[in-house]
Image: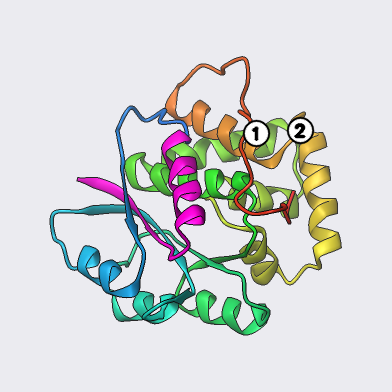
Amino acid sequence: MAGVLIVEDDRLAGNAIARLVRKTPRHDGIGRGVLVARNAATARDILRRSDIVLLAAIFDVKLPDGDGLAVIAEFAERLEGVPVLVLTGHHDEAALSQRAFLLGASFVAKPVDPAIVRRFILGATTRRLVAERQVRGVVESWIRRYRLTPRQAQLLGSAVAGETPDAFRAATGISPDRYKELVGELLARCHRRHLDDVALAVHREALGTPRKTSDRPALAAVGARTTHP
């Protein structure tokens, strides 16, 4: 079984994320299951199963019986090569994002923009199920086609890989305001309205899937508000 692991103790938030994962387009033609764990113990049980091929994992930090980041560290070997997204509603974002970064995970604060989850899942499944050179070739084609600057090209690659804005800013050292400017520049060059439109278009081109009338279905936010473009 190939699936996405969601570790979230909040039932409403966990179910909302699971719906987002299930609604993410499957242009690769390969189905994916969703495994939801409400606590660290259940997450450990799932991670010990050898019959599950993890395509991606989404972890909340604070769990009733432990720390999500501690579970990631404990199963570092099992999660090697698996894209991991860490969610938190806590205030000490700097320290938590650093811990996530050291574990090779992306980090985003709650409430979560559903577009970020969708880009993360698209990037995760593509990295696992499509040859990397195929996607890389399309990215390079876009860089030439739209005459992107090195920083714009870096953002394009980050969006296609499903990285979060926090992860991109941490890797590049740019400010939130500069990040928003950079997103605007990339969208203007690529003639798209949203960053997830860009990522989805690259995935479709790599997979040879025709563009649909709407590349951006309406998604309900996970939480009260969105925090990233």
* Amino acid, disc 1: Asp
Q: Residues within 10 Å of mark 2 (few under 14, many from 20)?
A: few
Magenta span: 1-23
Identified at 44% across, 78% down, the residue is 69
Q: Which residue is mark 1?
A: 197
Identified at 29% across, 48% down, the residue is 3
Query: In this rendering, is residue 130 above or below 98?
Result: above
* Amino acid, disc 2: Arg
Q: Please identify the quadrant where the N terminus is shown.
A: top left
The location of residue 180, given as percent across then percent down, is 82, 54
Is residue 132 in view from this perspective?
no
Say whether marks 1 and 2 touch (CB < 8 Å).
yes
Q: CA distance from mark 1 to mark 2?
A: 7 Å
Q: At numbered mark 2, what does the secondary structure look like: helix, strand or loop? A: loop
Q: Which residue is mark 2?
A: 193
Identified at 64% across, 54% down, the residue is 223
